[in-house]
Image (cartoon, rainbow, N blue to C red):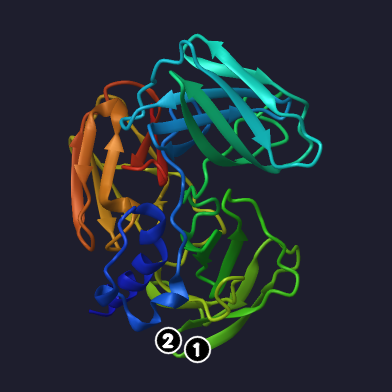
Amino acid sequence: MRKQIIAALMAVGLVAACSKKDAPPEAQAPAAKSHAVAEPHAHAAPHGGVVESTSQGHMELVVTRAGGYRVFLLDDALAVRPVAGASGTVKVAKGGHPDVKLAPVGDHLEGQGPEHSDDHLTMVVTVVRDGKPEVARFSAHLEEHGHDGTSAAPMQAHDHTPLHGGIVAMSGETHLEVLSLKSGEVRVWVTDAFRQPVPLAGKKGTVEAAGASVPLVPGAAGEFLSGTLPPADGEREVTVRLPMPDDPEYFIGFLLTPVDAAKAPATKAAVDGAVQEVTITVQGGYQPSEVTLKQGVPARLRFVRKDTGGCGDELLIPDFGVRTPLPGLKETVVDFVPDKAGTFAFTCGMQMMKGTLVVR
């Protein structure tokens, strides 16, 4: 029962970020305002950009620091729609920045504008086809270096992948990743909508477990907030209280299993007879998030969900034909044969929680 209560708290912090459905007022707990979360505007991006809904389906924007733009028109299934005869413009929310004209090139529209020096920019894209305008507003994040070493596509907003081996939750546009160490130390990383660190100077909170409460303060390097509880080896309930810009009384509860290091290593599946097995915990992310398997040996992945809402409702391993529901607070066994070597992704249905299978 206590685990279900904590899982419910976790669901409040995540479900609004992963579901388009709002709970009816009568189903909300009195303290729900302490976990208010803005709905995300991110979808799976077929071309590595950012996707937004429009009146006619979806629109995907891929923008580079060098000022290049590609715009794809997508239907409800995120398949590409024709752009023949279309035209468009990109308006950047920055004083003095010229509008960029878009023209069809193959299956998308392209345009070139001035180089960007900002890391975060708001852009409004308008595409006109058959006399009908289609408009979408994007919040783009531009990395200093992209996948090709010269430019970058914007990161998908509200990606819940743990960056430090912990568990991720949200408050509005802010992400918290919480990790418990066996020494008793609890670390909290605070990032923005695009998982970029936010300043921690002056930010204070508390972390609580088993009746103990200790301050959360910036660590020596300022990378995360830290508080040290009594040491623990087993899973325990941990509550983090941390004032947020939109909620000065924000708190959230977790079931955390302490680890030895700040980042859990990749896990190699244990081979039992003719089957290799590994257990993966699902709670705001996948732990472990990287699993090594032997090629050709039947694999059995045990997914244990410790929450009841949000992105973890479905599991996808497309390279091995796996698509299955993951009911909350239960273990789901997934059997398949990794018959090809390489690195393969496994994700939730919305592709916001991500893991990796390394087959050797």
Amino acid type indicated by mark 2: Ala
Image position of 60 with respect to 35: above or below: above
Residue 113 shown left or right of residue 344 in the figure: right
Residue 303 shown left or right of residue 120 in the figure: left
Q: Where's the N terminus, which quadrant? A: bottom left
Q: CA distance from mark 1 to mark 2?
A: 6 Å
Label 1 with label 2: CB-CB less than 8 Å: yes
**Label 2 residue SS:** loop
The location of residue 18, given as percent across then percent down, is 37, 53
**Label 1 residue SS:** strand
Closer-to-camera residue (60/357): 60
Quadrant of residue 301 in the image? top left
The location of residue 190, given as percent across then percent down, is 61, 62
The location of residue 279, given as percent across then percent down, is 29, 51
For label 1, the residue is: 212
For label 2, the residue is: 210
